[in-house]
Image (spheres, rainbow, N blue to C red):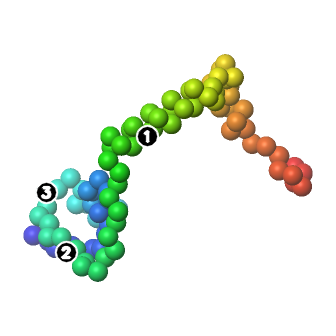
Amino acid sequence: MQAIELATTISMQGGIALPASFKNFYGRDARMILLIDDDSPDVAPAPQRAKRQANLRQALAAMAQAGTFAHIDDACAWQREVRADRLQPGREE
């Protein structure tokens, strides 16, 4: 049995990732003891998924009602145009 000590942050999804330098341990079974610092700042919990979805639905409905993207006939062409690099003022190529 080998022991590894490292400091990391637990993701909001509960994941703990080993750095790439420990790649030889990826996919292996392990036992863990987590030591959580008492003085670490409390992170506000992520909003509930249902609430986020409801907010997104409301925002999309408002955009649809306002006709925000109604003028766009070809979405792919519009994206290419929007993403095209523009010359910046004062710069000559």
Tag 1 residue: 55
Residues 44 and 76: in front is 44
- The x, y position of residue 68, in whole percent, is 64, 30
Q: Is residue 20 left or right of residue 79?
A: left
Q: Secondary structure at mark 3?
A: loop
| Mark pair 1, 2: CA separation | 36 Å
Q: Which mark is residue 35?
A: 2
Disc 3 packing (10 Å; few <14; some 14–19; many ≥20): few
Kind of residue at disc 3: Asp
Kind of residue at disc 2: Leu
Q: Which mark is residue 29?
A: 3
| Dot in front, 3 or 2 | 2
Residues 62 and 16: in front is 62
Q: Secondary structure at mark 2?
A: loop
Residue 17 visible here: no
Q: Is residue 14 left or right of residue 69?
A: left
| Dot in front, 1 or 2 | 1
| Mark pair 3, 2: CA separation | 19 Å
Q: How many marks?
A: 3
- The x, y position of residue 75, in whole percent, is 62, 24
On the image, which quarter does residue 74 sit in?
A: top right
Q: Secondary structure at mark 1?
A: helix
On the image, which quarter does residue 73 sit in?
A: top right
- The x, y position of residue 77, in whole percent, is 68, 25
Kind of residue at disc 1: Asn
Disc 2 packing (10 Å; few <14; some 14–19; many ≥20): few
- The x, y position of residue 9, in whole percent, is 32, 67
Q: Residue at x 29, y 80 (%)?
A: 39
Q: Give the mark nearest the N terminus, 1 or 2.
A: 2
